[in-house]
Amino acid sequence: MFNLTEEELCRYINEDLPYLDLTTHVQEEKNIKATLEIYTREDIIVACSEEAASIAKILGCKIKKFKPSKTELKKGEVILKIKGSYEKIQQVLKLSQVLLEYSCKIATQTKSMLKIIKQYNSSCELLTTRKTIPFSKRMCIKAILCGGALPHRLGLSESILFFDYHRIIYDNNETFYKEINKLKNRLPEKKIVVESKTYEDSKKLIENCIDVLQLDKIDLDTTKKIIEYKNKINKNIKILLCGGINLSNVKDYAKLEIDGIVSSSMYSCGMANLGCKLEIKK
């Protein structure tokens, strides 16, 4: 696990607080003591609570308690409690709450999908795409790790994945199939992953000893046929499924003899229902 850096958090703070909080600045009693609790209104997996606490520290508040990332919380439980001046508490409130609302929802959705997958296929992993929320990649990655998933691809630099639009430089698919062995020799420490959308193309890729076959939006019956063919030819080839897989349908795919399910759905699942309780200490 990793934490977002102070530099990253300061950039986030400065987007919302470039100078001052004008509303509290014009209030006369802004220096009175206050406490803030951020709590959940639903069952969640906590994510990025360390960052929410760090934001409070950077802005001059003290941490009374917080629940670490990966903690399972029930409705009504407190994620973070801080104390400080009323003015500082107001600066922290939405910055920390919104960060937690996004990250906890991603982690919770991820955990729910993984739980279903493992119920039907203990050897299948949940993998998340690089379609993270723009400018929020590290938050998204930390959140899915808190939910128990692994990144499918962190970026373009660390893995090999051929899509249809990578094949256009070849004369035809047959030329590409013949190139697979050369690619494997050139990249001996990497696995060659190729996405396929048809039964015939998948058969050819299997016959040419691809390392990992990623099936995109292929119906369940055809997927079963591809898996059966793979098991006859080369059981060592790994099978990934992707394309429109989410919490509502992941069970159907998890029942198959596959190695991983690739999804982006957790990045667009909304926000956790969190609340704030602010109290003045007189």
Image: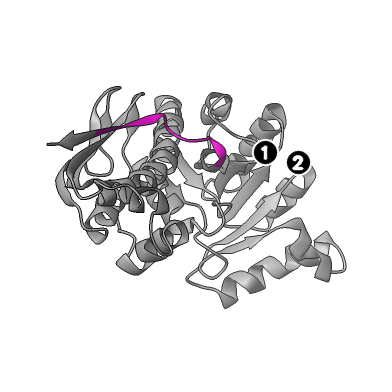
Instruction: Look at 34% across and 60% down and name the residue there.
Output: 4
Hey, which quadrant is residue 43 in on the image?
top left
Q: Toward the viewer: 282 or 47?
A: 282
Q: Residue at x 23, y 38 (%)?
A: 36
Q: Quadrant of the N terminus?
A: bottom left
Image x and y of residue 178, in percent: 74, 67
- The amino acid beneath tag 1 is Ile
Mark on residue 199?
A: 2
Residue 48 seen in the figure? no
Query: Magenta segment, which residues?
Result: 268-278
Residue found at the far bottom of this picture: 186
- Neighbours of disc 1 within 10 Å: few (<14), some (14-19), many (20+): many
Looking at the image, which is closer to me, 202 or 148?
A: 148
The residue at 27%/23% (across/down) is 76
Q: Nearer the viewer, residue 5 or 232?
A: 5
Quadrant of the drawing holding the C terminus? top left
Residue 12: give its label: none
Marks 1 and 2 close (CB-CB < 8 Å): yes
Furthest residue in direction right, as rendered: 171
Q: How many marks?
A: 2
Q: Position of residue 242 (x, y in %)?
A: 62, 42
Tell me if residue 270 is in the magenta stretch.
yes
The residue at which mark 1 appears reads as 226
Q: Is residue 161 left or right of residue 146?
A: right
What is the x, y in percent for residue 61?
20, 53
Gap between marks 1 and 2 measured at Cα = 6 Å
